[in-house]
Image (cartoon, helix red, strand yellow):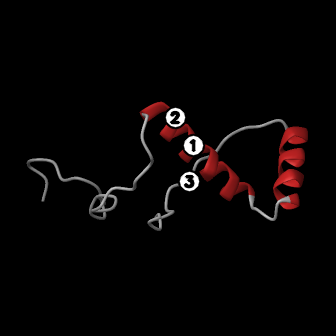
Amino acid sequence: MAIEVRTARLTILIDPRKKAYFERLCAEEDSTPSQVVRRLIRRYIEERSGHPWKPPESGPKRTPKGGPRRAGRP
C-alpha cells in the first residue's frame, strides 16, 4: 500500500463521553484515534466508490503562497 501524505486536518464535534469511550477503545487495540478515523474514512470511500482506495499518483496540488493571482494584480 502506498504511503499517504497526511497534511489535511478534519475537525469534528462529538459528545465528550463518546469521545472518551472511543479513545479508550482505540487504546485497547494500540491505535490512535487518528489511525482509526483514517481507516474508517478509507473503508467508507471504498464502499461508496466500489473500488479500492488508491492515492493519486502526482500527489496533492498546492497553491503558491499568497493564493491564486487575479488579472490586474501585481
For the point 62% across and 51% down, the residue is: 39
Q: What residue sits right under mark 3 in the picture?
A: 9
For the point 77% across and 37% down, the residue is: 14
Q: Is residue 11 left or right of residue 51?
A: right
Graded by Cα atoms within 10 Å as few (under 14), some (14 to 19) or many (20 or more), the crowding at tag 2 reads few
Percent position (x, y) of residue 47?
52, 34
Q: Element at badge 3?
A: loop
Q: What residue sits right under mark 1 in the picture?
A: 43
Q: Is residue 35 left or right of residue 10?
A: right
Badge 1 vs badge 2, beta-carbon distance below 8 Å: yes
Q: Is residue 67 above or below residue 2?
A: above
| Front: mark 3 or 2 | 2
* The furthest residue to the left: 72
Q: Is residue 74 left or right of residue 39?
A: left
For the residues marked 1 and 2, what is the alpha-carbon distance in whole angstroms? 6 Å
Q: Amino acid at mark 2?
A: Glu
Q: Amino acid at mark 1?
A: Arg
Q: Element at badge 1?
A: helix
- Tell me the number on the disc at residue 73: none
The numbered mark, 3 or 2, whose residue comes first in the sequence reads 3
| Front: mark 1 or 3 | 1
For the point 81% across and 55% down, the residue is: 26
For the point 33% across and 62% down, the residue is: 59
